[in-house]
Amino acid sequence: MALVFSSVYALGRSLGYSPRLSLFGAVIFAYTPAVSFQITSCENDLMVGALYLFCLALIVYFHRQAPNIEKRGNHLFLLAMAALFGVGTKPVMSFILPGLIFYYFISGRDGNVSGVRGPSWRDIVTRRPATTSFVLLSGVLMGSYWYLRNWVVFANPFHPVDVSLFGHLIFGTGHSMEFYGYTQQGHFSLAGLWGNLSNLFLDMIFDQRIMSAESEGVTNWGWFSFVCGVPALVFTLSRRRGMGMLSACFIISLLTLFSFVLPDEWCMRFTLWFPALFALAFVDLFLSLAKSCWRIPTAIMAGFCLLLNFCVVLNAGMFTVGDFRSLLQTPWFERSVTAFDSEGHFRNILQDGTLTRTLGRLPKTEPFAYWVSDNTFIYPLYGPDFSRKPVYVQLEPPEWTYFIKEMENKNLGSLFTWNLDQNRMNVVKWVVRTGKLEEVNDHLFLLR
């Protein structure tokens, strides 16, 4: 979050805005629901967005402020490190890099389309080859670590996603959608681009579903982006050429992203960096209204939209008023928000007592193995006081029965399962028939 905030602030300063207005732009972006939700989640999309904006801030800065080779060289090294680290964080970074590359080579100082002024990257590389090699090698090592690890462990650097090229499987098993519930396109597709654009403008832009860190079926860009940001961008484009080049950078990155990812319900979480354009455009609009009677009404409207953005992340439709009352009436040491999930993930489980009775058969101090279909189901296993010790085991292809070895090696005497698909249920039942597991009920099995 600190990198996101400081990058948007640096963008504002590099574009010529005052420290106060640049800070205002960073605050606006921080109030974007997608950003706020990701801060409280374990998703890595915010990190990718932060590195994208950091790279853009570096490019804008050294186009305008670093004409000599020493300064430009230092920033170019930082740029390479950040970009490679972003690719190492998530392959999505490589899909949005074309916008940054476009902006680097097209945008000159003061936003003119006159090429990059000052020493070029070729000058820097030829004059400082040792430093260049060291920095690039360091960036490659940082960016490739996780891919190499997956390649060694799973024989697929992009695990658990399958990678195909022109219909031919390159990495993976070809069954990632069947066994893991998701996959990714990973290659350029005009059909994918059209599908993502259609979903964006015909459905997701209306934000009609529950907002969350996954941005399922919504943009998660919030009221401010559409009520204030879009009009501000249209206004700014008509008066500032440099903003046009910046907008082109964002749009190219968005289009290339949409060309490489599946048009599914979760792809908008990859775009949480885009509302930064709306925040900067509004700052530019607000600056132009310095002596206008519309300045105060515009500020009021912006404040109201930011308030709505803030309110939506407090609840996100997950809990009802009755849920909050129940929480207040429950002793604090026994509170568990999962017990009041309005989507029904846990409400029925706890009402009929299945989960409570099953976990009640396990000693609180004894670690136990588990496999559940969704991360959301993990939290109740710890208990409200986090006294239980669930340990994840792999119930995955192709070594379906490897989880038995894991349980033996980790001294786990019991296995808890929830909402298994038919393939995994068949595997567990088969192990029961072999005599290695004893079935207590549909969710609890003991290791013999």
Image (cartoon, rainbow, N blue to C red):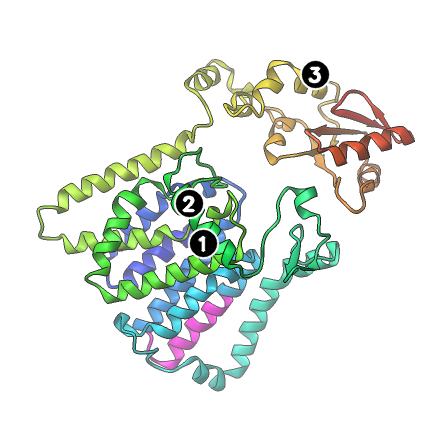
Q: Is residue 247 above or below residue 69?
A: above
Q: Earlier in the sequence, mark 2 or mark 3?
A: 2
| Residue picked out by circle 1 | 49
Q: What separation in Å lies between label 1 and label 2 (alpha carbons)?
A: 9 Å
Is 72 covered by the magenta stretch? yes
- The front one of 448 and 173 is 173
For the point 57% across and 60% down, the residue is: 187
Is 177 covered by the magenta stretch? no
Q: Is residue 82 left or right of residue 373?
A: left
Q: For residue 2, say whether it is visible.
A: yes
Q: Residues within 10 Å of mark 2 (few under 14, many from 20)?
A: many
Image position, residue 264 (x, y; %):
52, 45
Q: Are marks 2 and 3 in contact (CB under 8 Å)?
A: no
Residue 156 sits in quarter: bottom right
Secondary structure category for the residue under label 3: helix
Q: Is residue 365 left or right of residue 144?
A: right
Image position, residue 301 (x, y; %):
21, 40
**Amino acid identity at mark 3:** Arg
For the point 71% across and 36% down, the residue is: 391
Q: Is residue 272 above or below residue 342?
A: below
Q: Is residue 420 left or right of residue 82?
A: right
| Residue picked out by circle 3 | 357
| Residue picked out by circle 2 | 35
Image position, residue 144 (x, y; %):
62, 63
- The front one of 221 and 336 is 221
Magenta residues, start to end: 65-81
Q: Residues within 10 Å of mark 1 (few under 14, many from 20)?
A: many
Predominant secondary structure, magenta span = helix
Q: Mark number for residue 3?
A: none
